Image: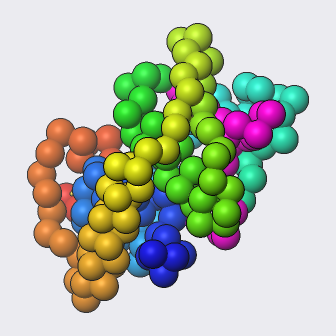
Amino acid sequence: MRFYYEKSNWCNDSYYFLCKRKLWLFAHDINMEQESEAVFIGKLIDESTYKRENKHILIDDIICIDYINNGIVCEIKKSKKQKQMAISQIKYYLYVLQQHGLMHVKGRLAIPKEHISEDVELSEQDIGQIEENLQAINEILNLLVPPSIDKKAACKSCAYYEFCYI
Ligand code: SF4
């Protein structure tokens, strides 16, 4: 299974759920995220919270952990709208750490603006799901052309909106 995760960072995994076309575009270096206001706000919150922690721990060039506190992998988000995706993100980080032999690391999701702090653990079922997703992601990344536009409400706030529609 190491083969799959080496090729897939968390962006790939999250984009897989959001939009398969977005996943393909991003993975092929067509990157427009810097223009997204949502991404800018997220960075601002990240830079202004938990200032004393040692932040942004890069592992294998595929995941970037917000910070580690007492051996717990912590991820900061700006609102609970992203809660389920953030929990999946932390589980993916825990999975990557397991591939390095760190079997019992736990995670925590922090949403400072809403005073939320929630523990996250990786189950056997999560591992099976992650490996299934990684396999599906690899299949999409190997397509010669991007998947067609998948029209949905999220398109309006997507960084690729202009690329897809204009
Ligand atoms: S604009 Fe819509 S179809 Fe295009 S990449 Fe974004 S979410 Fe996918």
Image mark count: 0
Q: Quadrant of residue 22?
A: bottom left
Q: Main secondary structure of the magenta part?
A: strand
Residue at horizontal 14%, vertical 57%? 150
Q: Position of residue 116 (x, y in %)?
A: 55, 15
Residue 43, can we see it? no
> Which quarter of the image is occupied by the N terminus?
bottom left
21 and 103: which is toward the camera: 103
Q: Position of residue 76 (x, y in %)?
A: 61, 32
Residue 105, can we see it? yes
Q: Quadrant of residue 63?
A: bottom right
> Which quarter of the image is occupied by the C terminus?
bottom left
Whether residue 141 is in magenta: the answer is no
Q: Quadrant of residue 105?
A: top right
Magenta span of residues: 59-78
Q: Position of residue 69 (x, y in %)?
A: 78, 34
Residue at horizontal 54%, vertical 22%? 118
Residue 23 left/right relative to 75: left
- Furthest toward the bottom, the residue is 144
- Furthest toward the top, the residue is 115
13 and 48: which is toward the camera: 13
Whether residue 67 is in magenta: the answer is yes
- Furthest toward the right, the residue is 52
